[in-house]
Image: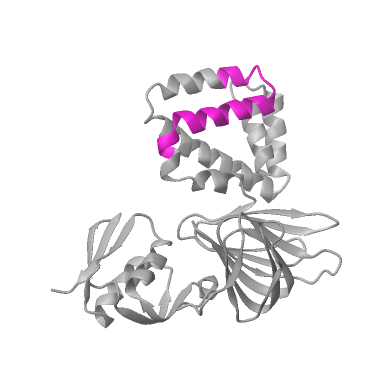
Amino acid sequence: MVKQAIQWTLRLSGNADPELLSACEHWRQASPEHETAWLRVQALNSELAAGYQAVPGARVALETLENTSQRLQRRQALKLLSTFAIGASALWLARDVAPWQRWMADYSTTTGERRRFTLADGSLLQLNTDSAVNVRFDPRQRLLALERGEILVSTAKDAARPLRVRNRDGLFEALGTRFVLRQDERSTRLSVEEGSVAIAPRVRGQTTTIAEAGQSYEINGDSALLAERSNMDSAAWADGLIVTRDMRLADFLAEIGRYRHGHLHCDSSVADLRLSGVFRLDDTDKLLALLPQTLPVRVEKRTDWWVTVSARG
C-alpha cells in the first residue's frame, strides 16, 4: 500500500491535471488502508522537508529533482529522490533512521506507541514502541518481516501455511504458539509464552533449535543460545505495563527510555539499586516521579529531552 502511495505522490508532483487528481482521490477512498498509507507518506514528506532546510542548497536541489522526476519513469524518479534524501540529509537521517522504516512498513509504531492488529488469517500481531513489520501472506506461506523493534504474535492455526517471522538474525517458525520477538542493535531475543518456536539462525548450516514455552533465546545470526531468566516480564508491555523482579535501576531506566524521546541518564552512584514492581507505561514522566518514593534517588528534569536520576542528597 505504501509503495502505491509513493507512486501517487510522484505522479501528482508538479502540475497534475483534474483527471489525475480525481483518480488519486478515488484510490484513497477505495479502502481505509489506502488512506492510511497516503497520510503516512505525506507525513514523512513533511519530516523530510524539515530536514532538507538544514542542508545548504537543499531547496534548490530538491526543486531540481522534482522537475527531473516528471521526465523520468516513476521507478527512476523514486530512486533519484531516495538517493538525494540519503546524500543531502545524511546527518539528519543518521539521527533517526526510524522514519524511513516506518514509512515503508505495512505496520509500524512511533516512540512510546503500542498497537495491535488482527491479520488476514486471524493471527494477532502486537507492536511495541518504535517498531516496524512487513507482512506477506500468499497461498503457500504466512511471513512477517521484523524490520525493527519488538512484536508479540499469537498465531492462528493453518496447517497448510506455517507462520514464520524473518529478521536480520534468522527465521522463526511458530508451532502453534504465542511469542515475543525483540530486535536490538546486537541481537534478537525470542521469548516463548505458549507452544513452541523453531529457530533457524541466518547463517546457513546452523542447527535448527526448538524453543519451548517459558524459554528465551538470544540469536545473533550464527547461533541461538538459551538465555538466562530475565528480570522483566517479556510480554507485559502488550498490556501497557513493565513488570520487574529485582531489576537494576540502570537497566530499568534503559527500558523506560525506549518509550520516550530524549536522553534518560542514570548516574553510576545509583545504577546498581534494585527495583521490583508493576509500572504503567502510558505516562513515563509519572512513572519516573514515583521512583523517589521507593528508592533513595532524585529525578532532575533539566529539559523535556534531558532527565537525570541520581543519588538523593
Q: For this view, does 303 lie left or right of residue 205?
A: left
Q: For this view, does 109 lie left or right of residue 289?
A: right
The quadrant in which the N terminus is found is top right
Q: For this view, does 217 lie left or right of residue 86?
A: right
Place of residue 310 in the rendered image (x, y in percent of width and height, measured from the top left): 22, 69
The quadrant in which the C terminus is found is bottom left
Measuring 24% from the left and 66% from the top, which residue is drawn there?
Answer: 267
Choose top left, top right, bottom left or bottom right for residue 173: bottom right
Place of residue 256 in the rendered image (x, y in percent of width and height, measured from the top left): 39, 66
Q: For this view, does 37 lie left or right of residue 185?
A: right
Counting every numbered tag in the picture gives 0
Measuring 68% from the left and 41% from the top, which residue is drawn there?
Answer: 28
Nearer-the-camera pick, 156 or 39: 156
Most common SS among magenta residues: helix
Residue 139: say if magenta: no
Place of residue 45 in the rendered image (x, y in percent of width and height, measured from the top left): 52, 36
Nearer-the-camera pick, 13 or 208: 208
Measuring 68% from the left and 28% from the top, which residue is drawn there?
Answer: 75
**Coloration mode:** one colour
Residue 68: say if magenta: yes
Measuring 47% from the left and 74% from the top, which residue is drawn there?
Answer: 241
Query: Seen from this angle, which residue lies furthest front?
Result: 205
Relative to 101, does residue 79 appear above or below in the rendering? Answer: above
Nearer-the-camera pick, 14 or 186: 186
Region rendered in magenta: 66-92
Relative to 100, does residue 192 appear above or below in the rendering? Answer: below
Place of residue 302 in the rendered image (x, y in percent of width and height, measured from the top left): 22, 57
